[in-house]
Amino acid sequence: RDARQAQNLHLNGPAVGAWVAKLRANSAPPTADTEPEMLSNAQRVELHRKFGEISLNAYCRSATKFLQGPRRLRDDFGSTLLGSDRTAEIVFAANLDLRLQKYRIIADLCSQSREARKAFASSSSSSSSSS
């Protein structure tokens, strides 16, 4: 069907001709000459083994490439193997930041409670003097 559509377009040129010829060859009904060759069990086993080996090698290459690439945690914390481990410094800095935040929150709460006590004391003294 595709070959007939290409013929109907009346396109000229060697590339189009080769493409149309390939389409005709692929769409031709199978004959005895084009039947796939039957493989023996030993050949199938060998092909399966080669395919498994190729797949395993490809997987190993991709995994190795992934592990060699930059990684966010390794970039942040360093690596003991490379002698650039910064984990202790980062944990200490984060701990210090949290403690400073805690002290700021406690100071803010203390000042708010002090203001609330003053406001309560002034409102109770004004209400007792007006009674």
Image: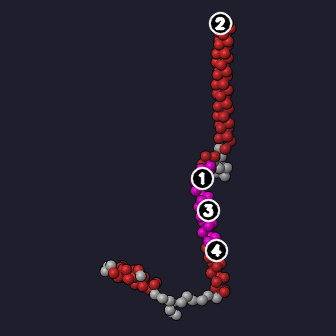
Mark 3 or 2, nearer chain start: 3
Crowd around label 1: few <14 · some 14–19 · many ≥20 (10 Å): few
Crowd around label 4: few <14 · some 14–19 · many ≥20 (10 Å): few
Near-viewer residue (105 or 8):
8
The N terminus lies in quadrant:
bottom left
> What numbered label is drawn on residue 71?
1
- Which amino acid, mark 4? Glu
**x, y (%) of residue 112?**
64, 22
Closer to viewer: mark 2 or mark 4: 2
Q: Please report contact status of discs 4 and 1: CB closer than 8 Å, yes or no.
A: no
Residue 15 covered by magenta stretch: no
- Which amino acid, mark 2? Ser
Crowd around label 2: few <14 · some 14–19 · many ≥20 (10 Å): few
Q: Please report contact status of discs 3 and 1: CB closer than 8 Å, yes or no.
A: no
Q: Which residue is mark 3?
A: 64
Q: Please report contact status of discs 2 and 4: CB closer than 8 Å, yes or no.
A: no
- Which amino acid, mark 1? Arg
Q: Which residue is mark 2?
A: 130
- For mark 4, give the secondary structure: helix
Query: Which color scheme did the rendering employ for the protein?
Result: secondary structure
Task: Inspect this view and state whether residue 113 appears.
Answer: yes
- In percent of the image, x 65 and y 9: which residue is there? 126
Closer to viewer: mark 2 or mark 1: 2
